[in-house]
Image: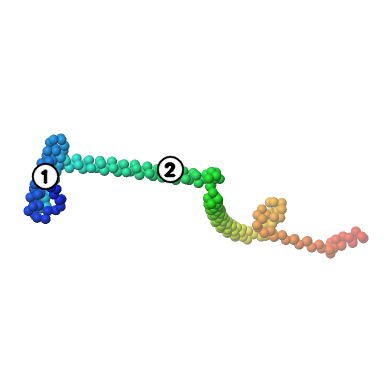
Amino acid sequence: MGRGKILIRRIDNSTSRQVTFSKRRNGLLKKAKELAILCDAEVGVTIFSSTGRLYDFASTSMKSVIERYKKTKEEHSQLGNSTSEVKFWQREAAMLRQQLQNLHENHRQMMGEELSGLNVKELQNLENQLEMSLRGVRMKKDQILMDEIEELNRKGNLIHQENVELYKKVNLLHQKNMELRKKVYGTRDANTMNRNLVLANGLGIGEDLHVPVNLQLSQPLQQNHETPASATKLGRLQLH
């Protein structure tokens, strides 16, 4: 009679569990050794008992087996990640191509092309989209114009302020100039200054138009209508 199947579950009895552990551990290590010899394989087995005791077997050395395991595991992980990344970008490229095709189709329809396959409702939706787009373009244009007008007004105000400042400076310079002229010409005789100006320019107006010109009428010479005494006597002698 053959042996029946044993139910694989935890053995409750500690003595039976320890006996089973020893038998199967020895069998597992024996099979690992046979596998390494028969198939020229690099085998490493590590076993910890329930009490924490270590049992191991390595066909070469446990360190080399573990290093080889880590290296191979990393290579498989990177390969799996690369494959997943390639598939991801392929899906992304397909989606982008579809979106680009849809955008080209919408652009052609907005330009009035390829409208034969659209029904009345789709044409109405397209018309509404065009109206909304046109409204947005007009609003943007108006906003740009308003910004430009505001900028021009700001520049105009700055120029106006600069003109006001320049006007103030000109007035200040003019006042200083007048004060200097008063200091220079204030002690001179007005009639003498007028005669000098007439001799220099041949006119009664000086070179500077801002300097006031005082014109005065000269008094006529008094004529002596009385006959001098000598003249009377001479006339009498001639008459005699």
Left or right, residue 208 beside residue 58? right
Residue type at mark 2? Arg
| Residue in the image at 7% along x and 50% along y | 19
Rendered-image quadrant of the C terminus: bottom right
Which residue reaches farthest right? 240
Q: Mark 1 points at which residue?
A: 2
Q: Tell me: residue 161, above or below residue 64.
A: below
| Residue in the image at 79% along x and 63% along y | 222
Circle 1 sits in a helix, a strand or a loop, which is it? loop
Residue 158 position in % (x across, y down): 55, 56
Q: Estimate how packed mark 1 is, as few (under 14), some (14 to 19) or many (20 or more) residues with alpha carbons within 10 Å.
A: few
Residue 41 position in % (x across, y down): 16, 37
Q: Estimate how packed mark 2 is, as few (under 14), some (14 to 19) or many (20 or more) residues with alpha carbons within 10 Å.
A: few
Circle 2 sits in a helix, a strand or a loop, which is it? helix
| Residue in the image at 30% along x and 43% along y | 81
Q: Name the residue under label 2.
A: 97
Query: Is residue 214 at all visible to an observer of this figure?
Result: yes
Rendered-image quadrant of the N terminus: top left
Residue type at mark 1? Gly
Q: Nearer the viewer, residue 121 or 49?
A: 121
Q: Earlier in the sequence, mark 1 or mark 2?
A: 1
Count of marks placed on residues: 2
Left or right, residue 212 beside residue 88? right
Q: Which color scheme does this rendered protein use? A: rainbow
Alpha carbon separation for disc pair 1 and 2: 65 Å
